[in-house]
Amino acid sequence: MSITKYIFVTGGVSSSLGKGIIAASLAKLLQARGYRVTIQKLDPYINVDPGTLNPYEHGECYVTDDGAETDLDLGHYERFLNVPTSQSNNVTTGRIYQSVIEKERRGEFLGKTVQVIPHITNEIKERIQILGKSGDYDIVITEIGGTVGDIESLPYIESVRQLKWELGDDNALVIHLTLVPYLSAAGELKTKPTQHSVKTLMESGIRADILVCRTEHELSDDLKKKLALFCNVRQEAVIQSIDASTIYDVPNMMLDEGLDKVTLAKLNLEDTTVPDLTHWNSFLTRHKNPKGKVKIGLIGKYVELQDSYKSILESFIHAGAENEVKVKVKPIHSEYLNAANIADKMKGLDAILVAPGFGERGIEGKIEAVKYAREHKLPFLGICLGMQMAVIEYARNILNLKDANSVEMDPETSDPVINLMEDQKAITNMGGTMRLGAWDCQLTEGSIIAGVYGTKEIKERHRHRFEYNNAYRDQLESAGMKTTGINLETDLVEIIELENHPWFVGVQYHPEYKSTVANPHPLFVNFVAAAYSFSKSKSK
Ligand code: GLN
C-alpha cells in the first residue's frame, strides 16, 4: 500500500469515555487483518510532557524505549498491538509551542507574525504526519485528548479539519466517541448530548464519519437510526460501545459491531480478510477461566487512583492469564503502614510488590513491608523506588546502618546507600532529565533473574535519578543481598536478590512498561508463579 491512511478519534459529551481503548481496539482489529498500524495521542495541556505531572493529576507516566515520558494511553497501545511506541506517538500543546517558539527564535519564520493559524496548526499537522511519512505504517490513528468544544482543543480540531481536506475523504476519517446516557427516571437512553457534541464538531467544520457511543444499555436499531439521521452518519457507522467487564473484550465487541468494516469501507481499503484474533482470544480464555487465585499486595502511595499504577495492574492481568490464575491485587497505602499494623495488613497475601515513586511520603511504610516480606519469605518484587527501599531496609536491619537512606529522602544521611547519580548532580531542570528509556543490563548466571529471562542480556526501560551506591556493594553482597544485574557501561546496579529467600527481587528498571498481551513480561509471569507456589504451600 502506498499511501498512509489517517484516522482521527475525537471525544464528546464527557471525558473518560475510553478513547484510548477504542483507538487501541480498532488498531488491533486492523492489525489482525494484516495492516501495519500505530496510534498517536495528542494532549492539549501545556506541560511539554507528562513527566512533571503528579500521578494524581493524570495517572501513570508511561515511558517508551526511546526515553519519552508519555501519556498512559500509549501503554494501552503497546499492550494491545505489541509494537513499541516512541516520542512521536505523544505530542502535547507544550511541545508544539516549544518547538514553534524555538523556530521563531532561530528566525525560521522570516519576519512573519507567528500565529495559531497557520504556525501552530502546521506544527500539529507535521507531527501527525511524521509517523505516516516514516513508511512503517499503513494506518495512523490519532487520538485527540480532551473533549470537543474545549478552548484548548481548538487548534487540534482545526488541524484535523485541514488535514482531512488536504488528504481527501478516502484517506482520512473521523471517529467521534460520545456518551449515550441512560436516565433511569425516564427509563430511556438519551441521544441529545450526542447530537449536541456532533454539532459542536460541525461548527469547527468537521463531520464525524463514525460515531462510537458509550452506553450502559444496548442501543436499539431505532435508536441507532435516530442517531444516524440527526448526526448525519450512515446507520452502520453508529457503533455501540457497551460497558465491558475487561478492556480486553473491547476488540471483539468492536468486531461484532463492525467498526473495522466501516472503517475499511470509508478509507477505501480492502476488506477481504477476517481479523485473526487466535492468540488474543486464547489469552482471553485463560484470563477468564483461572484454575487458581493469588492475592498480591501493591504497596504504594498513590493507590487511591487506579490509573497511577496502570501498567503494573495490566502486567498482572497478562501474567495471571499466562499462569492461568486470577491475580487479585490488594492496594495498600504505604503512608499508613507501620510496625504495629504490618502483620495485620499483610495477612492473607501471597506476595507483595513495592511500587515506584518519588519523594519522602510513605517510604517508611514501604520499608516495613520489605522487612515483612524478607522475614516471612513472602515473594517480593520491588520496582525502582521499591528496589531502593529493599536496599535501605537491608542496610538498616542487617548491616545495622540505622541511618541508611536515599539522599532523595535525607540529603544529610550518614549512610547514603542510594545516591544521586553522578550525571544528575549538575541538573537543575526537572523535565525530561532523569535516566530514561531502554538501557542494557547483564544478568548473573545462576540467579533467579537469569532464570526468569532465560538469557544473560536484557534491555529494560528506566525512569530514575538515584541509584544503588556501589560503595556499599561489598558489605551488602557479603551479608546476602546479591547484585544480579549490572549495566556494564556505567557499573550501575540494576537488580538485587536475596540469598536464603525463595523469591526476593528488586529491579531499578520498570518491567511493567514492556508487558503486552502477546508478550507477558517474564518477571511478572515468574513473580505470579512464585506467589501461587507460596499460596499452595500455605494451604498444605
Ligand atoms: N525516586 C526514585 C529515583 O528517582 C525512584 C524513581 C521511580 O520509582 N521511578 O531514583
Image (spheres, helix red, strand yellow):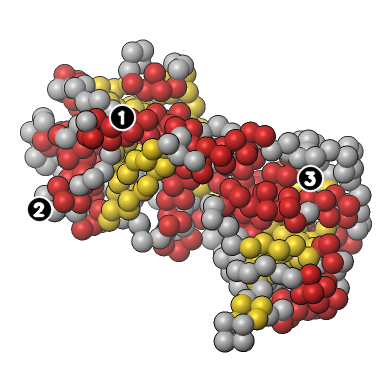
Q: Decide: is 521 above or below 214.
A: above
Q: Nearer the viewer, residue 399 or 414?
A: 399
Residue 146 appears in the rendering:
no
Q: Locate the N terminus and report the quarter of the image it occupies.
A: top right
Q: Earlier in the sequence, mark 3 or mark 1?
A: 3
Which label sits in the foreground, 2 or 3? 2
Q: Where is residue 353 in the image (x, y as percent from the top left)?
A: 32, 41
- For ligand 1, tell me if the residue under mark 2 lies within 8 Å: no
Q: Type of residue at label 3?
A: Ile
Residue shown at 84% from the left, 38% from the top: 273
Q: Residues within 10 Å of mark 2 (few under 14, many from 20)?
A: few
Residue 75 appears in the rendering:
yes
Q: Which of 124 and 211 is in front in this view?
A: 211
223 lies left or right of 364: right
Q: How many marks are shown on the rendered structure? A: 3
Q: Decide: is 200 above or below 95.
A: below
Location of residue 3 (image quadrant): top right
Instruction: Report, in whole angstroms, how far the alpha carbon at label 1 lies from the one at label 2.
Output: 28 Å
Q: For numbered disc 2, what is the local secondary structure?
A: loop
Q: Position of residue 415 (x, y in %)?
A: 15, 37
Residue shown at 20% from the left, 47% from the top: 347
Q: Which of 431 and 152 is in front in this view?
A: 152
Which label sits in the foreground, 3 or 1? 1
User: What residue is pinned by disc 1?
Assistant: 533
Q: Where is residue 145 in the image (x, y as percent from the top left)?
A: 63, 62
Location of residue 468 (image quadrant): top left
Disc ID at residue 340: 2
User: What residue is pinned by disc 3?
Assistant: 139
